[in-house]
Amino acid sequence: MADNLVGVLARAEAACADVDFSALANWKAGGGHAIGCSPGYVPMELADAAGALPVFLFGGTPTTETVQGEAYFQSAICHLPRTLLDLGLRGALDGLDLLIVPSTCDVLRNLTGVWRITLPKQRVHYLDLPQRYDADGYAFYRRELENLKRAIEEAVGERIDDDSLRHSIATFDWRRRVLRALDELRAAEPWRVPTSEIYLLVRAGAAMLPAEHVELLVDYLEAVRASDRKPLDLARVVLTGAFCEQPPLGLLRTLERAGCAIVDDDLLSSLRWLGTDIELRDDEDPLDALTRAYLLASPLLPSRYEGDERRPDVLVSRVRKRCASGVILASPSFCDPALLDRPGLLEGLERASIPCVQLQYTENSTDFGSVREQTGTFADAIRLWENL
Amino acid sequence: MNLVQKDDAMVRQKAMAATLAARQEHAHAEGKKVVYTFVPGNLTELLLSFDIVPVYPEVEALRSGMRKASDGYIRAAEQAGHSEDVCSYVKCDVGMGLSGDVGEGEGKLPPPDLLLLSSTGCATFFKWFESLRRIYGSECSMLQVPYQADGVITADMRQYVVDQLRNQVIPTLERVTGQKYDEDRLREHLRRSREAEDHLVAVLQSAKQHPSPIDAWFGAVYYVGPIFTAWRGTQEAVDYYACLRREVEDRAQKKLGPITPDGPLVEEKFRLVVEGTPCWTNFRELWQMFAAEGAVVVASTYTKVGGLYDTGFRHDPDRPLESLAEYCLGCYTNLSLPQRLDLLERYVREYDACGVVVHSVKSCKAFGAGQVLLLREIERRTGRPGCMIESDLVDSRYFSNAQIRNRLESFLQAVSMRRKAS
């Protein structure tokens, strides 16, 4: 591997290894504001426009300790709220001027209240995202964004002016373009751009200024394009269901070692939510633009109501678009949104004759032996049948 | 052997259940439209104003749990790809739908002409009706009900619900039924709702007396049945609740305790508040466990999932759509955790409870996430002890008699010791 690629990946790994958010503490020590969000969609352009460091909380990793957080949730609740609360209880998130919790599921919804009771000094704002994608949903969400903007302004003690918000939207659009370029390159040459690396690169931006994150992503893109990696015989698959609580990096690497090239996924969705740029129109109110973007450019992730779309059709289209040969349905344990989608997706995939395999994980899983067996067999079967 | 004691209200309720089952079974033959909808945030008065026959899937699930049929349906859903980890109500309904065996057993339910998804208090409702839509192929009209994260119903939240009612739900009901929206009819149903709600609150608040004449969890799930479902807004409901209120007031006057599965409770030893849903598959068994210890539930949160009336809300015929919006927004599972905590504290104090039992079910994240903290905080705030028991809604694999009995007995012993010490 070329030195510069090694270096870029090392930078990303170092950022991801910062499970106690020392980057946040350093930023605060410099006198800045910081605003965090839990998994799901939050237009963090508003945080950036307020001059705050946008912090995307993705939960923990196998090395994250959740001693206090464990004591607050029953065994039938997913692992994510334990980690988030634990970070809060041990002071790792003290630097946040505001935590925004979007309406991703009932567990995160209730975490808002848990947070308010256990950490009463920390500001929390609940963002109710619209499940209607029509004029009523638009009007509701527009009002929600006004409330969010006000909450951010109160938290940082600064007004967010339209020009700053326009600038932040442009910066975030820049990051979205680079992320899409990465996705396109991965789809074209998955052996060159493993998903486990994209995952590291994206997650590294969790507590970084957007421009700094773009720089890291661009460095990687350039380094990986220039690399001498060789094509590999891999089974092209779409990985779906891992939109909220994240699988451990070890799981993704295991899938790759088992012969799978993940060519599309919904990992780290809060940083990659919108499928297109917002592209602010001339004289368009920036809050209107954010409202429009969510309603028109959101992916049909498990936390969103189907509306007129159908999940199986959307998944099959993703598979076709990326010329994938199979699907890995990977969901966190006890995740109602992702797990309740499965039967419909299985039916749809069967109808379309697309093979799939199902996995469940928690963010702190460490044993992937059975995953390797299962997905190795799956990848072998795909390659065998494709080559016949 | 104990003879089952049936009061007039119980007889009435049984007759109402039979009438509803027949009405549901014959709806299509009689040219009526059938709408499946949820209990929390239900729009029953609006449906009745269109002569629609409502069906409540979670009620069908809990009924199948009570008659021990749910496990088979759940297995059928799991064979169709559902995970063990998810809501057993959904799996039970899916299993029923897949087996074409929808209904309480006496009569089959007709398939829905419309799924009316009111999202009050539960994100899983979206998934539930997405699943049923796949099975039945029917249209789904969705009403998004914002969550009371900040503990208040804001004008924006109310407006959003009213807008959806006016622009989406009512036009859909007009199209499906071929009838025009008649606000005067709606007002009339809402007026009757209000009357029945007054009676229900009097019944629930009778538990403030010593001894309590009712069990406000095991017993009250029967009491709330009509008003949580197809009878709210009808004269039958008004008559039922007036009758129930008379009977309960009579028992209170005579200082009688509640009727339990083993007959009238002789001595009220423990007054408890319960947070959480019942376990339907082992409902009677659990009630007997409580009754055997002389434990009476004097207030519960589950009996507020279909409407929180004892804090003052009433349907208002003068503000029909606004009032329906406030009803949807105010149901228990749509409250923030701090609101739930305040309500529990209020119940403990106002009903003079000696402890709190949290029944945590594997299925329900809306209820479950945060319950450990509720228990801890309620103990801290009131000084009354609490205990958590765990099982499930309609999946009997998660019910362990020995484990629950042990916990309950140990908890009540601790309450007794504390009582003696003080």
Image (spheres, coloured by chain):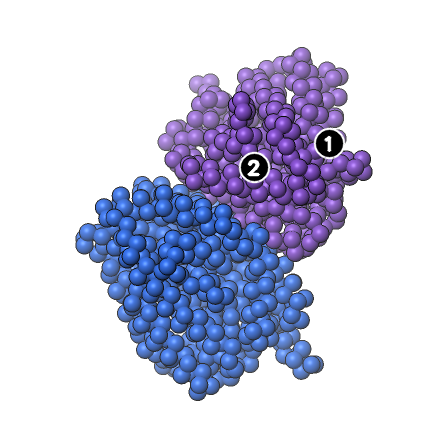
The answer to whether residue A253 is visible is: no
Say which residue label 1 marks.
Answer: A15
Amino acid carrying label 2: it is: Tyr
Residue B231 lies left or right of residue B330; in this view the side is: left
The quadrant where residue A255 appears: top right
User: Callout 1: few (<14), some (14-19), or many (20+) C-alpha neighbours within 10 Å?
Assistant: many
Residue at (73, 38) in percent of width and height: A33
Same chain assignment for discs 2 and 1: yes
Chain B color in figure: blue
Residue A101 lies left or right of residue B32; in this view the side is: right
Chain A color in figure: purple
Which numbered marker is on residue A41?
A: 2
Are discs 2 and 1 less than 8 Å apart at CB? no
Above or below: residue B205 compared with residue A294: below
Q: Nearer the viewer, residue A15 or B78?
A: A15
Residue at (44, 61) in percent of width and height: B307
Amino acid carrying label 1: it is: Ala
User: Callout 2: few (<14), some (14-19), or many (20+) C-alpha neighbours within 10 Å?
Assistant: many
Residue B57 lies left or right of residue A53; in this view the side is: left
Q: Nearer the viewer, residue B360 or A141?
A: A141
The answer to whether residue B202 is visible is: yes
Which part of the image, by quadrant, shows the N terminus of chain A? top right
* CA separation in Å, label 2 and label 1: 22 Å
Which x, y percent locates residue A174?
61, 22
